[in-house]
Image (cartoon, rainbow, N blue to C red):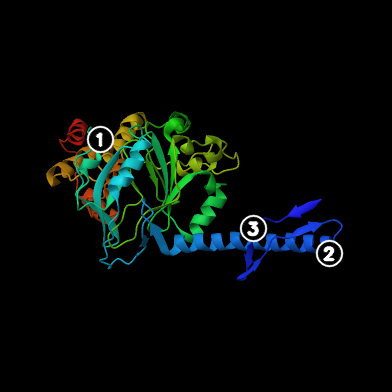
Amino acid sequence: MNIYIPGNISIGGNKIKKLSLTRENPVFLKRSLEWKWTIWQILVTRRYLRMENYMNKVKATAHSHTGDKPIGVNNSEHSQAVVSVNLPNAWLYYDKLGFKMVPLTLKLVNGKKVVTNMPRWKKQALTSASIKQCHNALAIITGEASQLTVIDFDISGTALSAALNEYGLEIDNYCYALTPSGGLHIYLNWSNDEFWKKRYQRKTLTTTNSNIGIDIRAEGGLIFAPPSIVEGGGNYQWINLPVNRKDLDYDPNKLIPLMDAIFVYNHNPSPLAPAMKEITYPIAENDYHPNQQDDYEITECLIRQLYGTNIDYKDWIRMGFALKNKFGNSGLTLWLLFADNYAYKDTVPELTIKWNTFPAYNSVKFRTFLYLTNN
């Protein structure tokens, strides 16, 4: 029997010619073992180099959707470097996946991402023609519009690794992108949305959990997508991108530990756990009660739909009055959601101070809030 090793193999710059080994050859066994060992070394070395190259890219560079010149990640707040990206090509790519998008300009100001030049997008079908020269980013509309849910890990480094391990998340099984801060966006098909809503008794899955640094973007949400750039603050890049909609499918059972943590859900509480202390507040006529849960979740969704929208200051204040009139002190959590509005620079402490200036009883009703948010 003849064993042929096709072609010339280059090891260390020296080419090795084809060999023909036979069982009758006295050095057959020795040569066979040598070749097996050499080929194994080559495979291991190549795998190591590929992994090293991947880690270097994640740490130091990102690439545009078209795969052209690398875009250096620069997380320096004071950097003024602006790198152009081919947004029209990215738009076509996402459009084939069925995503609805909004072009915008992203920049880092005092450590916070600020959105400008965003066209009106609610109840409108935008096309790639809406992309202007000033735009450097794309935001995908999550929820039913794009049939998309995104898990946003706003943590990085060891905290991110610990979270993935704690919730048993095998990240390579999902389509995900890297954020400028080192976090992750996991893209999921919206098909299991009703399963999660029923489990957590919610009208929408869009939520923010600042305790663990993991959020959900679904109905009424937006997510910045690669190859978006944050001027002065890095850019977004795909690590495992979807080729078609099927790539976004997932097994919801494998995400239950993570989703339970995000929504603070315990389906099997320990009988030994201490009872939660009941905190009693003065009850006002318009204070928040459990039977107003539907209104509370609808309000949360409406506020999130305002992300990136410039709101008239007087209307914004009236919204605050209406929230306090409807939900009492429990409305503060809703009011603080305005801190996530990329069109403004308001911080949580500033919003809290403003909230404390609102009277507990006022003439601005909840229907005024509904009118303002829908117009």
Residue 303: quadrant of the picture: top left
Q: Is residue 160 left or right of residue 346?
A: right
Q: Is residue 80 above or below residue 200?
A: below
For disc 3, the marked residue is: 7
Amino acid under label 2? Val
Amino acid under label 3? Gly
Residue 83 visible in the current orientation: yes
Camera-nearest residue between 250 and 331: 250
Sequence order check: which comes first, mark 3 or mark 1? 3
Amino acid under label 1? Lys
Circles 2 and 1: CB atoms closer than 8 Å: no
Q: Point out residue 138 in the picture as x, y percentages from the top left corner.
A: 29, 47
Instruction: Give the residue displayed 18% in from the left and 32% down from the top.
Output: 371
Q: Point out residue 239 in the picture as x, y percentages from the top left corner.
A: 46, 52
Residue 24: quadrant of the picture: bottom right
Instruction: Give the residue displayed 30% in from the left and 57% down from the top.
Output: 230
Q: Point out residue 119 in the picture as x, y percentages from the top left corner.
A: 19, 43
Circles 3 and 1: CB atoms closer than 8 Å: no
Q: Is residue 198 above or below residue 239?
A: above
Sequence order check: which comes first, mark 3 or mark 2? 3
For disc 2, the marked residue is: 27
Rounded to the nearest whole Å, what is the CA distance between mark 3 and mark 2? 21 Å
Rounded to the nearest whole Å, what is the CA distance between mark 2 and mark 1? 89 Å
For disc 1, the marked residue is: 326
Q: Is residue 278 above or below residue 210?
A: above
Q: Quadrant of the C terminus?
A: top left
